[in-house]
Image (spheres, rainbow, N blue to C red):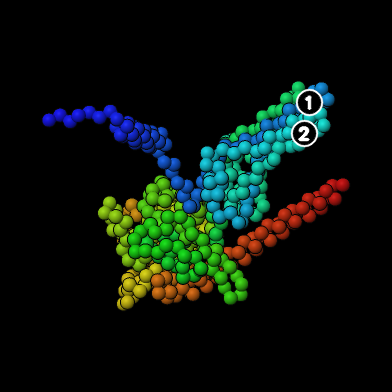
Amino acid sequence: MALPMRCGTQSKVLSIKSYKLLNNLLLLTVRKYAVGPKKKPIPKFVDFLQLQVTGGTGGQGLPKYGGFGGNGGKIFVTAKAKVKNLRQLAVQHPKQTCKAGVGDNSSKFHLLGNSGKDLNLEVPVGVLLHTEKGDRVDLNKEGDSCIVANGGIGGNRETNFLGLRGQTNMIGLELKLLADVGLVGFPNAGKSTFLRAVSKAKPKVAAYPFTTLTPQLGIMEFDDGRRISVADLPGLIEGAHQNYGKGIKFLRHAERTKLLLFVLDLNPFQLSEKYPERSAFETLLLLNQELEAYGHGMLDKPAILAINKTDTDPSGEKVTRLMSLVQNLPESLETVDEELRPTTLAKFDDILTMSAQNRDNIEAVRGKIREVMDEYAEKRLLEELEKKKSLMSLREDEEHLKTTFV
């Protein structure tokens, strides 16, 4: 039996409600697809940032009264110790563009326009600035600064009273951490645990590889007030110099350290099923190979080897075997495949054992780090003094020759 159709007020109300509901659903659908893909979140640690920087445009002159427009603002990059990485800049300039202030136009009552506001980009100490032309500027000290974009000239007689545009340049900001000691080792070797043990830093620690995804800094403090900064860097893997794993992103942070502490797990290591299991000695040689292949003087730095996780070797047999292999280099290279043999071997100023987890022998490692750093600092100072003496001697000889010929 067919139901009778109703065309009264109630059906009109229902029609209006249905229309509104359908309209809301359509709006939600449009918004869903109109928004597009979500923006990639900015990571907590940013160590490279590319920016387009533009100086401010010069203000317009006033030909009737001979007024000059103000110059456009400049853009500076300045090193500041309070800035820890490049994330703040990345957040402030999400489109990776920045522009200085525009110069004021000349006016009847203010013939000389004010200059545009300068823009100062604050970066961490240790940033290497790259320009389009291939130039590089090191900002290694607090307050180091350089101009990356000049502002346009304000309108004047030479420009027909028209304000000129400011410079537009592309710059790259590359952060290389400035730390006294760099911890190098394969994943899960115990670098983060060591940093926790010797400083107040709290890097993530867990029983699986790659718990450290960004560099962590800690300060070793001594009773006499001496402070030594230590950088815990993401673990290397085979092929790091070819940018596998954290690769070059990690290695560049080790470039400026004064000393390398090799942290070596006493036990065999296997990153995943794709990689073969490596003995502790093989792991050390692979680590050596990666630093050698990367270059940049990594193997010329003072170095200490810390054999970690001695708590897993109650009898001491593993430690004795490993120490024998390391101390008998290069002869002990005969015990491994040829592909694992580095061309240049790291030279260790000392080899120590420790258990970072149990804090066994940690003080001895701390003390040795300080001792080696002080020895090399004194050596560098003596070398600089010798150079100065040599230069002074040459100048005296030159003066003597001039006097003789006169």
Residue 274 image point, x, y percent? 27, 51
**SS label for mark 2:** loop
User: Residue 61 vs residue 362: left or right?
Assistant: right
User: Residue 233 vs residue 51: left or right?
Assistant: left
Image quadrant where residue 328 sits: bottom left
- The residue at 37%/64% (across/down) is 206
Question: Can you identify the residue that label 1 sits on?
Answer: 62
Say above or below: 383 vs 65. below
- Residue 375 visible in the picture: no
How many angstroms separate mark 1 from mark 2 (CA)? 10 Å
User: Residue 58 vs residue 274: left or right?
Assistant: right
Residue 265 image point, x, y percent? 37, 65
Q: Which of the image's four quarters has the N terminus?
A: top left
Question: Can you identify the residue that label 2 sits on?
Answer: 113
Dot 1 alpha-carbon crowd within 10 angstroms: few under 14, some 14 to 19, many 20 or more: many
Residue 43 image point, x, y percent? 46, 50
Type of amino acid at the residue the image marks with label 2: Gly
- Residue 249 visible in the picture: yes
Residue nearest the viewer, comparing 138 with 49: 49
Task: Name, please, the residue furthest toward the bottom.
Answer: 315
Image quadrant where residue 14 sits: top left
User: Residue 311 vs residue 217: left or right?
Assistant: left
Residue nearest the viewer, comparing 177 with 207: 207
Say above or below: 102 vs 225. above
Type of amino acid at the residue the image marks with label 1: Leu
Image quadrant where residue 74 sits: top right
Residue 97 image point, x, y percent? 56, 38
- The residue at 43%/74% (across/down) is 359
- The residue at 65%/35% (across/down) is 55
